[in-house]
Image: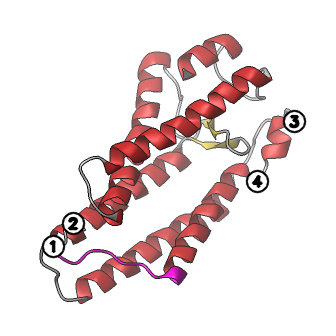
Amino acid sequence: MVVYLRQLYYPAGFTFPLAVIPGSQALVEIGREIATIVMLWAAGRLGTRGFWPGFAGFIFAFGVWDICYYVWLKVLLGWPDSLLTWDVLFLVPVPWVGPVLAPVLVSISLIGAAAAIETLSARGCPLRANALEWLGVAAAGLIVILSFTWDAKEIVGGRVPTGFRWGLFAAGELLALGLLARGVRAALARPRVEGSLRR
Protein backbone atom coordinates (compact mmCIF):
# COMPACT_ATOMS: atom_id res chain seq x y z
CA MET A 1 0.00 0.00 0.00
CA VAL A 2 2.76 2.45 0.86
CA VAL A 3 4.53 1.73 -2.43
CA TYR A 4 1.30 2.43 -4.33
CA LEU A 5 0.53 5.59 -2.36
CA ARG A 6 4.00 6.95 -3.00
CA GLN A 7 3.68 6.23 -6.71
CA LEU A 8 0.36 8.09 -6.76
CA TYR A 9 1.21 11.11 -4.63
CA TYR A 10 5.01 11.29 -4.73
CA PRO A 11 6.02 10.12 -8.23
CA ALA A 12 9.41 11.83 -7.89
CA GLY A 13 10.03 10.16 -4.52
CA PHE A 14 8.63 10.79 -1.06
CA THR A 15 9.45 14.16 0.42
CA PHE A 16 7.89 16.93 2.47
CA PRO A 17 5.69 18.98 2.33
CA LEU A 18 2.94 16.41 2.55
CA ALA A 19 0.71 15.86 -0.47
CA VAL A 20 -3.02 16.33 0.05
CA ILE A 21 -4.81 12.97 -0.06
CA PRO A 22 -8.57 13.06 -0.81
CA GLY A 23 -10.76 12.41 2.22
CA SER A 24 -12.09 9.02 1.09
CA GLN A 25 -8.60 7.68 0.40
CA ALA A 26 -7.27 9.15 3.63
CA LEU A 27 -10.03 7.32 5.54
CA VAL A 28 -9.08 4.06 3.84
CA GLU A 29 -5.44 4.56 4.85
CA ILE A 30 -6.41 5.39 8.43
CA GLY A 31 -8.60 2.27 8.51
CA ARG A 32 -5.73 0.20 7.14
CA GLU A 33 -3.43 1.44 9.90
CA ILE A 34 -5.95 0.61 12.62
CA ALA A 35 -6.56 -2.82 11.06
CA THR A 36 -2.79 -3.46 11.07
CA ILE A 37 -2.63 -2.82 14.83
CA VAL A 38 -5.62 -5.14 15.40
CA MET A 39 -3.96 -7.81 13.24
CA LEU A 40 -0.68 -7.53 15.15
CA TRP A 41 -2.53 -7.78 18.47
CA ALA A 42 -4.40 -10.87 17.25
CA ALA A 43 -1.17 -12.45 15.94
CA GLY A 44 0.54 -11.75 19.26
CA ARG A 45 -2.26 -13.48 21.15
CA LEU A 46 -2.17 -16.66 19.06
CA GLY A 47 -1.10 -19.67 21.09
CA THR A 48 -0.90 -17.71 24.35
CA ARG A 49 -2.94 -17.67 27.54
CA GLY A 50 -2.96 -14.79 29.96
CA PHE A 51 -2.24 -11.11 29.62
CA TRP A 52 1.56 -10.97 29.75
CA PRO A 53 2.33 -13.62 27.11
CA GLY A 54 -0.22 -12.00 24.78
CA PHE A 55 1.16 -8.54 25.43
CA ALA A 56 4.71 -9.77 24.81
CA GLY A 57 3.60 -11.40 21.57
CA PHE A 58 1.94 -8.18 20.42
CA ILE A 59 4.85 -5.85 21.12
CA PHE A 60 7.30 -8.36 19.61
CA ALA A 61 5.20 -8.63 16.44
CA PHE A 62 4.84 -4.85 16.27
CA GLY A 63 8.58 -4.27 16.67
CA VAL A 64 9.56 -6.84 14.04
CA TRP A 65 6.89 -5.61 11.63
CA ASP A 66 8.00 -1.98 11.93
CA ILE A 67 11.67 -2.77 11.31
CA CYS A 68 10.79 -5.04 8.37
CA TYR A 69 8.61 -2.25 6.99
CA TYR A 70 11.67 -0.05 6.54
CA VAL A 71 13.85 -2.90 5.34
CA TRP A 72 11.41 -3.70 2.55
CA LEU A 73 10.92 -0.04 1.60
CA LYS A 74 14.69 0.09 1.20
CA VAL A 75 14.64 -3.06 -0.94
CA LEU A 76 11.68 -2.00 -3.09
CA LEU A 77 12.18 1.76 -3.34
CA GLY A 78 15.75 2.42 -2.24
CA TRP A 79 14.26 4.52 0.57
CA PRO A 80 15.07 5.78 3.19
CA ASP A 81 18.40 7.34 2.29
CA SER A 82 19.51 7.12 5.92
CA LEU A 83 18.15 6.50 9.41
CA LEU A 84 17.78 10.27 9.78
CA THR A 85 15.42 10.55 6.80
CA TRP A 86 12.03 11.92 7.87
CA ASP A 87 8.89 9.83 7.44
CA VAL A 88 5.19 9.89 8.20
CA LEU A 89 4.85 7.18 10.82
CA PHE A 90 1.14 7.05 11.58
CA LEU A 91 -2.02 9.04 10.89
CA VAL A 92 -4.20 8.46 13.98
CA PRO A 93 -5.44 10.83 15.34
CA VAL A 94 -3.03 13.25 13.62
CA PRO A 95 0.05 12.62 11.47
CA TRP A 96 3.11 11.38 13.37
CA VAL A 97 6.39 12.43 11.78
CA GLY A 98 10.02 11.89 12.67
CA PRO A 99 13.35 10.49 11.50
CA VAL A 100 13.27 6.78 10.69
CA LEU A 101 15.74 6.18 13.52
CA ALA A 102 13.13 7.10 16.16
CA PRO A 103 10.54 4.39 15.35
CA VAL A 104 13.35 1.89 14.84
CA LEU A 105 14.60 2.62 18.37
CA VAL A 106 11.06 2.17 19.69
CA SER A 107 10.80 -1.16 17.84
CA ILE A 108 14.11 -2.39 19.27
CA SER A 109 12.86 -1.44 22.74
CA LEU A 110 9.60 -3.33 22.18
CA ILE A 111 11.43 -6.44 21.00
CA GLY A 112 13.73 -6.25 24.03
CA ALA A 113 10.78 -5.81 26.39
CA ALA A 114 9.00 -8.80 24.82
CA ALA A 115 12.12 -10.93 25.27
CA ALA A 116 12.38 -9.87 28.92
CA ILE A 117 8.72 -10.69 29.61
CA GLU A 118 8.99 -14.12 27.98
CA THR A 119 12.28 -14.91 29.72
CA LEU A 120 10.84 -14.01 33.11
CA SER A 121 7.77 -16.16 32.46
CA ALA A 122 9.94 -19.10 31.42
CA ARG A 123 11.98 -18.75 34.63
CA GLY A 124 8.84 -18.83 36.76
CA CYS A 125 8.97 -15.19 37.84
CA PRO A 126 6.47 -13.38 35.62
CA LEU A 127 6.43 -9.63 35.36
CA ARG A 128 3.84 -7.73 37.41
CA ALA A 129 2.77 -4.11 37.37
CA ASN A 130 0.61 -2.08 39.73
CA ALA A 131 -1.66 0.80 38.75
CA LEU A 132 1.04 3.42 39.33
CA GLU A 133 3.52 1.54 37.15
CA TRP A 134 0.95 1.20 34.37
CA LEU A 135 0.33 4.93 34.66
CA GLY A 136 4.06 5.49 34.23
CA VAL A 137 4.16 3.25 31.15
CA ALA A 138 1.20 5.13 29.67
CA ALA A 139 2.90 8.45 30.39
CA ALA A 140 6.10 7.22 28.73
CA GLY A 141 4.15 6.19 25.64
CA LEU A 142 2.33 9.51 25.49
CA ILE A 143 5.63 11.42 25.76
CA VAL A 144 7.07 9.47 22.83
CA ILE A 145 3.90 10.04 20.81
CA LEU A 146 4.05 13.74 21.66
CA SER A 147 7.57 13.91 20.24
CA PHE A 148 6.14 12.63 16.93
CA THR A 149 3.02 14.81 16.89
CA TRP A 150 4.18 18.09 18.46
CA ASP A 151 4.29 19.91 15.12
CA ALA A 152 1.45 17.99 13.42
CA LYS A 153 -0.67 21.07 12.71
CA GLU A 154 2.18 22.89 10.99
CA ILE A 155 3.23 19.76 9.05
CA VAL A 156 -0.34 19.26 7.78
CA GLY A 157 -0.33 22.94 6.84
CA GLY A 158 2.60 22.38 4.49
CA ARG A 159 5.66 23.04 6.64
CA VAL A 160 8.76 20.94 6.03
CA PRO A 161 10.03 19.42 9.30
CA THR A 162 13.50 20.59 10.26
CA GLY A 163 14.19 19.43 13.80
CA PHE A 164 12.99 16.44 15.76
CA ARG A 165 12.32 16.75 19.49
CA TRP A 166 14.93 14.22 20.52
CA GLY A 167 14.90 15.39 24.14
CA LEU A 168 11.20 14.66 24.50
CA PHE A 169 11.59 11.34 22.70
CA ALA A 170 14.51 10.32 24.92
CA ALA A 171 12.56 11.23 28.06
CA GLY A 172 9.73 8.88 27.09
CA GLU A 173 12.06 6.08 26.03
CA LEU A 174 14.16 6.30 29.21
CA LEU A 175 11.07 6.38 31.43
CA ALA A 176 9.69 3.25 29.74
CA LEU A 177 13.01 1.41 29.88
CA GLY A 178 13.52 2.44 33.49
CA LEU A 179 10.12 1.07 34.46
CA LEU A 180 10.87 -2.16 32.60
CA ALA A 181 14.20 -2.54 34.40
CA ARG A 182 12.48 -1.92 37.73
CA GLY A 183 9.85 -4.53 36.93
CA VAL A 184 12.49 -7.08 35.89
CA ARG A 185 14.44 -6.56 39.13
CA ALA A 186 11.26 -6.93 41.21
CA ALA A 187 10.27 -10.10 39.32
CA LEU A 188 13.68 -11.69 39.83
CA ALA A 189 13.54 -10.89 43.55
CA ARG A 190 10.23 -12.74 44.04
CA PRO A 191 10.02 -16.50 44.69
CA ARG A 192 9.63 -18.55 41.52
CA VAL A 193 6.14 -19.69 40.53
CA GLU A 194 6.10 -23.12 38.89
CA GLY A 195 4.08 -23.42 35.69
CA SER A 196 3.76 -19.66 35.23
CA LEU A 197 4.84 -19.58 31.58
CA ARG A 198 1.34 -19.27 30.11
CA ARG A 199 -0.54 -17.61 32.93
Q: Say which amino acid is labelled 3.
A: Gly
Q: Nearer the viewer, mark 3 or mark 1?
A: 1
Compared across the picture, whether 25 is left or right of 144 comes to: right
Give the image location of residue 97, x and y in percent.
67, 42
> Dot 3, crowdedness within 10 Å: few (<14), some or many (≥20)?
few
Could you say which disc has been placed on residue 150 in the image? 4
In primary-sequence order, the first of circles 2 and 4 is 2
| Secondary structure of the residue carrying numbered label 4 | loop
Residue at mark 1: 123
Position of the C terminus, as image quadrant, is bottom left
Q: Which residues are magenta?
A: 124-132
State the CA–CA distance, disc 2 to disc 4: 36 Å
Is residue 11 at least partly visible in the picture?
no
Could you say which disc has been placed on residue 119 in the image? 2
Picture quarter containing residue 53? bottom left
Give the image location of residue 134, x and y in percent.
51, 74
| Secondary structure of the residue carrying numbered label 1 | loop
State the CA–CA distance, disc 3 to disc 1: 52 Å
Compared across the picture, whether 158 is left or right of 132 comes to: right
Give the image location of residue 90, x and y in percent.
62, 40
| Secondary structure of the residue carrying numbered label 2 | helix
Picture quarter containing residue 23? top right
